Image: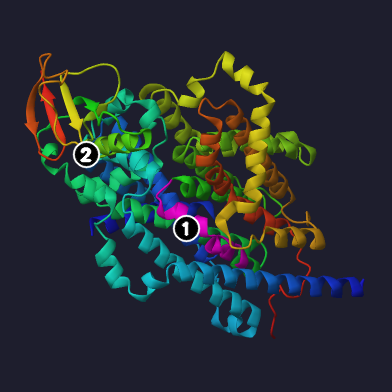
């Protein structure tokens, strides 16, 4: 019961924030709103919990602060120009008028239900998750929930190579927050946390593609994730890769919304800043994402006035600033140095000049093309055909497409060079992480793909019946 | 133009059909792997829930948790000839179940030592370094977990 209350508070925080971000009433659907609000609220709750805990507030005071924030947001929403009324995203009439839409909707629901079942069966078989879950995320949540006033001191003394106390605390903080609510370290808390992020990523992807293109493309986008076997495995293993992947996707989607239409919407740029900040609060790769996000925006200097772009970047930065301050404080004052960063020195240049390392990483990157996602038959060539035959459309969302595609290229390049300079055994590091790093970017890649591809066929266009 | 548009429509229709087949094939293959579980979910829940390796491993720590009322720093000793992977897993699980006590596997020897002898279960008092150098057994939990103190 208390767990539901805790999730309910986060959901309210998320949904009220979304009300303030999306001022244009018919811009989004309920499907989109629910899938964005819940993880966003969870992220905000985690930040609030750790921030006030570090300031010395006890758990009860933090709950009161969350409730006070909700009351404040309710008043803000009431005083804003109108209550948001998302458009209906699903209509039975439309569904039965288009057999293709009906077919894909049925397949989507079948796949969704099947994946819920798979997630459940895998979770009861391994309720503590796999290595990263019990060694990093849930272990540190135990420290916080069992020693709410001493954990920072204890983290500082943990062995960095074994437990990585420098990893950010979104997942850890929220799990500890819920365990303190329910006064019990139930394994269902991390399971449900990961369930929310896994399925909300699918929902957000499907809803966003559906809003920017059409419903069938939205369903296909969602189905790609639903049908990818390894995506569910990563979710029920309780790794944080789906969490960070959600925030990458949310950032790109919110940026696309912000730049849609004739004028840029500052409140959505702030929202994108918040989700980018939350990605860095989820995993260290999120910090690379923030760097790549700003670098990718520089490509827009070819299409935009630099003053205009600077103002946009300012809003983006303001959105992530409070979270970045928390991350910097955590990294400097609490966590021991990161093992990869700490090991750099003269050896870095030796590794950068070692061509055999490049060849090894290239080989692993190449192998991912064939094995990525563990499909029976990889469908990627179909998407390649789709783009070759239909072409790319830069008419709408040009800025988002260019910057989004640049982010993906920069991230993949960034991962490449992290492997080159890693202090760990290269093959071991590649074999344990490359597929997960690519999976973090996968939902964002699918979104950008569907945004880019030309809408040529009558098949994709829903029939309009007078 | 019209012919090109027709070509594209036919091509996309074929593409969509192939994609649909790939999706159905993949979903069916995934379903087959879990068919037994979907067939009897209640039985599978009863059979699997609470019987995983990590939960069962944690049962060994129920008693030992009670003796540490405040976060303590403990030196960790595992089995003498364990392989790297097994040693790492047992160490990590000891930390997992004994948090917020810090279990440290470094060269510094602390006043309190925890032994996790999941195979041999007992230490040999005659040959044990610590017992012959000022440490004594605080409690042997008879499951391989032994706490030593100075």
Q: Position of residue A31 (x, y in %)?
A: 51, 65
Q: Residues within 10 Å of mark 2 (few under 14, many from 20)?
A: few
- The span shown in magenta is A220-239
The residue wearing badge 2 is: B119
> What is the image's colouring?
rainbow
- Kindly identify which chain the residue marked by label 1 belongs to: A
Q: Is residue A94 magenta?
A: no
Q: Position of residue A224 (x, y in %)?
A: 59, 62
Q: Secondary structure at mark 2?
A: loop
Q: Is residue A79 visible?
A: no
**Residue sitting at 44 percent across and 31 percent down?**
A327
The residue wearing badge 1 is: A232
Q: Please identify the quarter of the rendering in which residue B61 is found.
A: top left
Is disc 2 in contact with disc 1, using a CB cutoff of under 8 Å?
no
Please identify the quadrant where the C terminus of chain A is shown.
Answer: bottom right
Q: Please identify the quarter of the rendering in which residue A430 is found.
A: top right
Above or below A282: residue A257: below
In the picture, measured across the screen, residue A84 lies left or right of residue B131, that is: right
**Residue sitting at 60 percent across and 36 percent down?**
A415
In the picture, measured across the screen, residue A86 lies left or right of residue A405, that is: left
Q: Please identify the quarter of the rendering in which residue A225 is found.
A: bottom right
Q: Position of residue A149 (x, y in %)?
A: 23, 31
Q: Which mark is residue B2?
A: none
Instruction: Label the magenta part by its dominant secondary structure.
Output: helix
Q: Looking at this view, is A65 or A130 the one in front?
A: A130
- Whether labels 2 and 1 share one chain: no
Please identify the quadrant where the N terminus of chain A is shown.
Answer: bottom left
């Amino acid at each position: 019961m208390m767990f539901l209350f805790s999730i309910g508070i986060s959901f309210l925080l998320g949904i009220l924030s979304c009300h303030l971000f999306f001022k244009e009433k018919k811009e989004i659907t309920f499907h989109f709103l629910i899938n964005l609000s819940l993880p966003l609220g969870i992220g905000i709750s985690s930040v609030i919990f750790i921030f006030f805990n570090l300031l010395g507030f006890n758990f009860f005071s933090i709950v009161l602060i969350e409730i006070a924030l909700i009351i404040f947001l309710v008043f803000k929403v009431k005083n804003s120009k109108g209550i948001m009324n998302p458009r209906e995203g699903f209509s039975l009439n439309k569904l039965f008028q288009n057999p293709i839409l009906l077919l894909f909707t049925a397949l989507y629901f079948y796949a969704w239900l099947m994946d819920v079942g798979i997630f459940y069966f895998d979770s009861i078989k391994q309720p503590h998750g796999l290595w990263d879950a019990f060694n990093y995320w849930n272990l540190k949540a135990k420290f916080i929930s069992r020693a709410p006033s001493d954990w920072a001191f204890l983290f500082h003394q943990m062995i960095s190579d074994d437990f990585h106390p420098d990893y950010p605390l979104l997942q850890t903080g929220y799990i500890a927050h819920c365990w303190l609510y329910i006064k019990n370290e139930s394994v269902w808390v991390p399971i449900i946390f990961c369930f929310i992020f896994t399925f909300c990523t699918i929902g957000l992807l499907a809803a966003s593609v559906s809003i920017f293109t059409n419903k069938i493309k939205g369903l296909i986008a969602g189905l790609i994730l639903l049908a990818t076997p390894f995506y569910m495995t990563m979710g029920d293993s309780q790794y944080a890769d789906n969490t960070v992947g959600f925030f990458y996707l949310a950032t790109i989607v919110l940026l696309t919304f912000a730049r849609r239409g004739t004028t840029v919407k500052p409140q959505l740029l702030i929202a994108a800043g918040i989700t980018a900040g939350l990605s860095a609060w989820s995993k260290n790769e999120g910090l690379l994402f923030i760097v790549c996000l700003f670098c990718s925006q520089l490509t827009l200097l070819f299409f935009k006035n630099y003053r205009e772009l600077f103002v946009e970047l300012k809003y983006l930065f303001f959105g992530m600033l409070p979270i970045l301050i928390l991350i910097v404080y955590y990294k400097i004052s609490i966590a021991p140095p990161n093992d990869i960063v700490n090991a750099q020195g003269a050896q870095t240049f030796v590794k950068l000049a070692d061509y055999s390392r490049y060849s090894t990483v290239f080989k692993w990157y190449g192998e991912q093309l064939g094995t990525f996602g563990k499909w029976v038959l990889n469908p990627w060539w179909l998407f390649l055909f789709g783009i070759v035959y239909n072409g790319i459309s830069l008419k709408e969302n040009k800025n988002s497409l260019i910057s989004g595609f640049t982010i993906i290229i920069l991230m993949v390049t960034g991962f490449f060079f992290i492997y080159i300079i890693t202090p760990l055994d290269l093959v071991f590091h590649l074999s344990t992480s490359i597929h997960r790093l690519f999976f973090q970017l996968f939902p964002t890649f699918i979104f950008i793909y569907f945004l880019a591809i030309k809408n040529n066929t009558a098949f994709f266009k829903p029939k309009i019946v007078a | 133009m019209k012919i090109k548009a027709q070509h594209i429509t036919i091509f996309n229709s074929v593409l969509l059909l192939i994609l649909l087949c790939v999706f159905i094939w993949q979903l069916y293959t995934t379903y087959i792997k879990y068919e037994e579980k979907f067939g009897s979910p209640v039985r599978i829940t009863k059979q699997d829930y609470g019987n995983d390796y990590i939960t069962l491993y944690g049962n060994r720590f129920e008693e030992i948790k009670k003796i540490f009322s405040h976060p303590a720093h403990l030196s960790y000793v595992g089995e003498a000839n364990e392989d790297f992977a097994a040693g790492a897993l047992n160490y990590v699980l000891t930390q997992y179940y004994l948090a917020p006590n810090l279990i440290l596997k470094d060269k510094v020897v602390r006043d309190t030592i925890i032994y996790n002898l999941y195979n041999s279960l007992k230490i040999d008092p005659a040959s044990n370094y610590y017992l012959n150098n000022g440490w004594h057994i605080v409690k042997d939990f008879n499951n391989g977990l032994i706490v030593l103190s100075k």
